[in-house]
Image (spheres, rainbow, N blue to C red):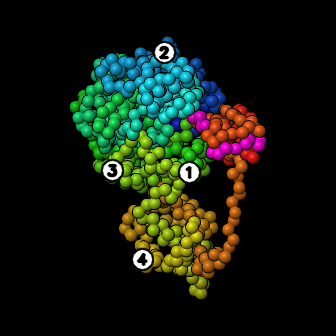
């Protein structure tokens, strides 16, 4: 008999699909819920049943407790799996389910309430014997009180929403002005994301490592920890790359961390999967951050190194079963790394990107590569929800091999129709500091102080991309000649001499020799031997160059190519020598001057218009606030200026590059 008859998944995207897999493996039917924007989403298609909740806004759908409870009654679901985000840590939701006899696959209400409030959880942790960060654990009355306490604690400080999580409702302040502004932003995000605008303040530990202890507990008093995860690669307090185990924490420190995590779990009679988040300094001193009473986004790295299906255990524990293993049964195998694939533009300060996935091909799944996704080709990336497309996870015997597998998998990941952070992730993996395991939460801001572009990190095999571009164009030329019948006439031959012209206007002459086994390229006195099964039209290249495996993304428009490899993009034209010579004579096209306009950097909602026509603005003054994908983005003046004209009203829906203001 199945543990439950039917489980409703109160979530969307990849975590909903992920939960359905475990439920299906246990022989349990699944129910999806969805908003109007998600009517054709992957999690809806994969469920046995689906129920429409309502409008696009989370408050009208995924955050609406009454509608979800009614969906359970309508479908006969006897249990609910909440995933992460939305109602996953909402005590009122668990209570509402309990009242109608539906099992909540998660912890008890007491644990949710205690750990869901960061002030309460910190006090409980301190009482239980867990190390805590110095700070002020009372709710802040206003920005003035925040400034007063910040000066007493000493800058930098962290302002946090008491119900926050996932990087939302959090702001770091290094001075009084940043504290006042951060108070307003954190309060607003806390209210919009969690329905709670209460804030508290604590000392910000600079250059910390973010370490997590995964645990799971049953109703029979057993609590087991499943090693530590390293989650230090973050941007705006949002994790980007995670791994397990941590390359930094020693076995002794991990043991003490795990012991304290168990103490905290027992202090609130914890049941189900949970995560104790900690920060560690350069001397391996560590402090409690928070406890997440749900499954974490990064749980797959723990699953891969332990061989344990955490979702399955959560379902079994919720059904009253005892955990089927002891602490000593938890074995570790190899190393796992997870990269979060987001629909965002890293070269425009990571603004969200929305649109339809015109082409979507995941890396080949294998024992080394796992993809947890919530989309398929043709699906829409909406402005209403988190922009994460999927999670890419690699597992290998060693950390170096896991990094190598991740780099290759990222190069094989094809996403077209929206911008993504895939190139940025590839760039991080090549950084010497990352390879050495020298990580902290300021890693990204330290290594990319001016932001990211596709030339930030040049791969060691960048010279091979010129011969590759020539090879691809030569294949296109051969195909065109075959289709037109020109090769039947012995007088015609496809040219073997080409010139690759890069973005900087540099000319790279190459000679090509093709046989049945490989392509040989002569380039500046060196020979490159290229072997592959690639044919014209494929957006993904996989092959070998001089015996080394190479994967890349290929975009082509006539003789222009963009080849993306390891976070670097070669933009080049492949021309005959004569055309290349003539191209030097072409005049350069001047770019349109838009410096007098403020353009929307992202699609979103204009929730704050801080200026009007005629206002005199100082450098650093706030101009507008744009809400996109549950985050508030404040845009400030880069220079002193006067506002000439305002094109939008507060409440307007904005498109990318839409004019908002004009400066004199």
Real-space Cα separation, disc 3 to disc 4, in angstroms: 32 Å
Residue at the (52%, 44%) spot, across then down: 342
Of marks 4 and 1, which one's residue comes earlier in the chain? 1
Q: Residue furthest bottom?
A: 491
CB within 8 Å, label 3 to label 2: no
| Region rendered in magenta | 631-646
Of marks 2 and 4, which one's residue comes earlier in the chain? 2
Secondary structure at numbered mark 3: loop
Real-space Cα separation, disc 3 to disc 2, in angstroms: 47 Å
What is the x, y in percent for residue 164? 49, 27
Real-space Cα separation, disc 2 to disc 4, in angstroms: 70 Å
Real-space Cα separation, disc 4 to disc 1, in angstroms: 34 Å
Residue at the (25%, 28%) spot, across then down: 326
Q: Main secondary structure of the magenta part?
A: strand
Real-space Cα separation, disc 1 to disc 2, in angstroms: 44 Å
Return the mark for residue 347.
Answer: 1
Nearest to viewer (mark 3 / mark 2): 3
Secondary structure at numbered mark 4: strand
Q: Residues within 10 Å of mark 2 (few under 14, many from 20)?
A: some
Residue carrying label 3 = 436
Return the mark for residue 25.
Answer: none
Residue carrying label 4 = 526
Magenta stretch contains residue 635: yes
Secondary structure at numbered mark 1: helix
Nearest to viewer (mark 4 / mark 1): 1
Of marks 3 and 1, which one's residue comes earlier in the chain? 1
Residue carrying label 2 = 95
Between 15 and 453, the one nearer to me in the picture: 453
Vertically, is 553 above or below 512?
above
């Amino acid at each position: 008999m199945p543990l439950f008859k039917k489980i409703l998944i109160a979530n969307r995207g990849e975590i909903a699909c992920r939960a359905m897999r475990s439920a299906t493996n246990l022989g349990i039917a699944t129910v999806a819920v969805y908003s109007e924007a998600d009517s054709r989403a992957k999690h809806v298609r994969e469920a046995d049943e689906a129920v429409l909740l309502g409008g696009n806004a989370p408050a009208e759908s995924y955050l609406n407790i009454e509608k979800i409870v009614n969906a359970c009654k309508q479908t006969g679901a006897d249990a609910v799996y909440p995933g992460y985000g939305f109602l996953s840590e909402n005590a009122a939701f668990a209570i509402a389910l309990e009242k109608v006899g539906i099992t909540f696959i998660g912890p008890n209400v007491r644990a949710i309430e205690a750990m869901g409030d960061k002030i309460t959880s910190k006090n409980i942790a301190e009482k239980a014997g867990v190390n805590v960060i110095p700070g002020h654990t009372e709710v802040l009355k206003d920005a003035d009180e925040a400034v007063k306490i910040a000066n007493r604690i000493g800058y930098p400080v962290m302002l946090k929403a008491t119900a926050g999580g996932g990087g939302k409702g959090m702001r770091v302040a290094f001075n009084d002005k940043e504290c006042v502004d951060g108070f307003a932003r954190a309060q607003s995000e806390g209210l919009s994301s969690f329905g709670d605008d209460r804030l508290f303040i604590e000392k910000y530990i600079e250059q910390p490592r973010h370490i997590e202890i995964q645990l799971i507990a049953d109703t029979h008093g057993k609590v087991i920890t499943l090693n530590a995860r390293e989650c230090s690669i973050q941007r705006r307090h949002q994790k980007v790359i995670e791994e397990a185990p941590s390359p930094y924490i020693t076995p002794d420190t991990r043991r003490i961390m795990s012991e304290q995590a168990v103490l905290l779990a027992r202090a609130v009679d914890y049941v189900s999967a949970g995560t104790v988040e900690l920060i560690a300094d350069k001397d391996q001193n560590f402090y409690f951050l928070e406890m997440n009473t749900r499954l974490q986004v990064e749980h797959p790295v723990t699953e891969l190194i332990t061989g344990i299906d955490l979702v399955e255990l959560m379902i079994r524990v919720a059904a009253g079963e005892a955990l089927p293993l002891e602490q000593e049964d938890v074995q570790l195998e190899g190393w796992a790394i997870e990269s979060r694939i987001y629909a965002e533009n890293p070269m425009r300060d990571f603004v969200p990107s929305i649109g339809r996935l015109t082409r979507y091909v995941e890396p080949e799944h294998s024992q080394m590569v796992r993809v947890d996704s919530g989309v398929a080709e043709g699906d829409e990336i909406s402005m209403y929800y988190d922009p994460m497309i999927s999670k890419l996870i690699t597992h290998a015997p060693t950390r170096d091999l896991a990094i190598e597998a991740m780099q290759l998998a990222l190069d094989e990941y094809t996403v077209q129709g929206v911008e993504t952070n895939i190139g940025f992730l590839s760039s991080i993996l090549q950084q010497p500091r990352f390879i050495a395991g020298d990580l902290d939460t300021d890693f990204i801001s330290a290594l990319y102080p001016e932001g990211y572009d596709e030339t930030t990190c040049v791969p060691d095999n960048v010279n091979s991309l010129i011969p590759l571009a020539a090879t691809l164009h030569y294949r296109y030329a051969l195909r065109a000649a075959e289709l037109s019948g020109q090769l039947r006439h012995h007088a015609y031959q496809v040219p073997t001499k080409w010139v690759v012209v890069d973005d900087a206007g540099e000319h790279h002459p190459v000679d090509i020799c093709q046989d049945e086994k490989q392509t040989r390229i002569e380039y500046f006195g060196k020979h490159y031997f290229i072997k592959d099964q690639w044919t014209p039209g494929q957006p993904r290249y996989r092959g070998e160059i001089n015996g080394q495996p190479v994967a890349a993304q290929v975009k082509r428009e006539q003789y222009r190519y963009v080849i993306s490899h390891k976070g670097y993009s070669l933009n080049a034209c492949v021309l005959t020598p004569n055309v290349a010579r003539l191209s030097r004579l072409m005049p350069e096209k001047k770019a349109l001057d838009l410096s007098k306009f403020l353009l929307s950097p992202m699609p979103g909602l204009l929730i704050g218009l801080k200026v009007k026509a005629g206002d005199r603005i100082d450098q650093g003054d706030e101009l507008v606030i744009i809400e996109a994908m549950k985050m508030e983005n404040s845009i400030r003046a880069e220079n002193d200026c006067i506002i000439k004209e305002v094109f939008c009203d507060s409440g307007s829906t904005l498109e990318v590059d839409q004019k908002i203001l004009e400066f004199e």
